[in-house]
Image (cartoon, helix red, strand yellow):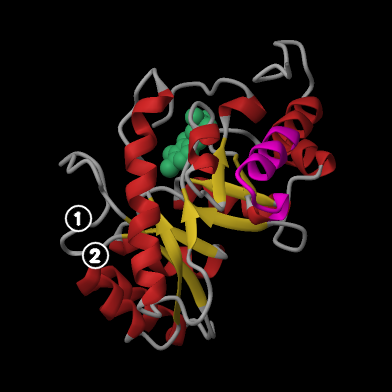
Amino acid sequence: MEPQTAGINATLSERFEQINRRIASLARDAGRPPEDVRLIAVSKTHPPEILRQAIEAGACEFGENRVQEAEAKIAEVGRERVRWHLIGPLQANKARRAVRLFDVIHTLDSVSLARRLDRLCVEEGRDELSVLIQVDLAGEATKSGVSEEDLPQLVEAVKACERLRLSGLMTLPPFFVDAERVRPFFRRLRELRDKLESDGAFDNQRGALSMGMSHDFEVAIQEGATLVRIGTAIFGERAANE
Ligand SMILES: *Cc1c(COP(=O)(O)O)cnc(C)c1O
């Protein structure tokens, strides 16, 4: 049996490789090609030198949850070798900087934010911006994300935006120690994606499914994740931030 995670003394590059192998084997078990699942290394709280080590190990997609923190790191690490994903909530007053900085925004959750991002793309001379809609499947008032009920309206609004490309759906389910308990949330997100896909919401592509973190990415891949967002299992524990 392959261990779930590399030992405590493993280097960043050993952990990164091990996660990649695990992702590939889970994808194959689910009857999907390994390249169907992309690993986003969640680098929030970690300094640029650690990100450079991750790049050396082969990382090419980073996830950050704060615009300001990401801005400083992107200035140091650059955009040539890396795609930057915003995975944290986006406030209106940071939207312009997000349009300048990020390749993909995973946390679109309102019609007003969609329209603002579209307008800012025009102002900033950006031809297109990939967005995922964050869906709040647990109805947790404290979490961001659009409710399932309001999802169709937001999808229509994004489709009406000239510069936004709807790339898929994202969810952040409640935390359970037993990752099996998140399976219904991941499954539900996939069903929503499938429905939208058959309605042509994703410009003739399959919609991405951004779901799964260090403790539950295995279940997420079994349920169809195409983007997994993994921090702790690659970089180790974070000092308190969120
Ligand atoms: C921090 C974060 C992650 C990564 O969490 P880990 O448990 O460290 O893998 C994934 N998604 C979002 C939205 C996050 O904020």
Secondary structure of the residue carrying numbered label 1? loop
Find disc 2 in the rendering and name its residue. 151
User: Which image quadrant: the C terminus?
Assistant: top left
Location of mark 1 (residue): 147
Q: Position of residue 76 (x, y in %)?
A: 70, 51
Place residue 201 in its image quadrant: bottom left
In the rendered view, tell whether residue 113 sits above or below residue 191: below
Location of residue 226 with respect to 53 vertically, above or below: below
- Residue 232 coordinates in the image, percent (x, y): 57, 27
Where residue 89 sits in the image (x, y, percent)?
35, 51
Amino acid type shown at disc 2: Leu
Q: Residue at x 78, y 33 (%)?
A: 17
Residue 60, percent from left and from top:
72, 52
Q: Main secondary structure of the magenta part?
A: helix
Q: Residues within 10 Å of mark 1 (few under 14, many from 20)?
A: some
Q: Is residue 91 magenta?
A: no
Q: Give the side of residue 170 with respect to residue 81, left or right.
A: left
* C-beta proximity under 8 Å, tags 2 and 1: yes
Q: Is residue 97 visible?
A: no
User: Going by the picture, which residue comes out furthest to the right?
Assistant: 56
Q: Residue at x 47, y 44 (%)?
A: 223
Marks 2 and 1 sit apart, C-alpha to C-alpha, by 6 Å
The answer to if 32 sits in the magenta stretch is yes
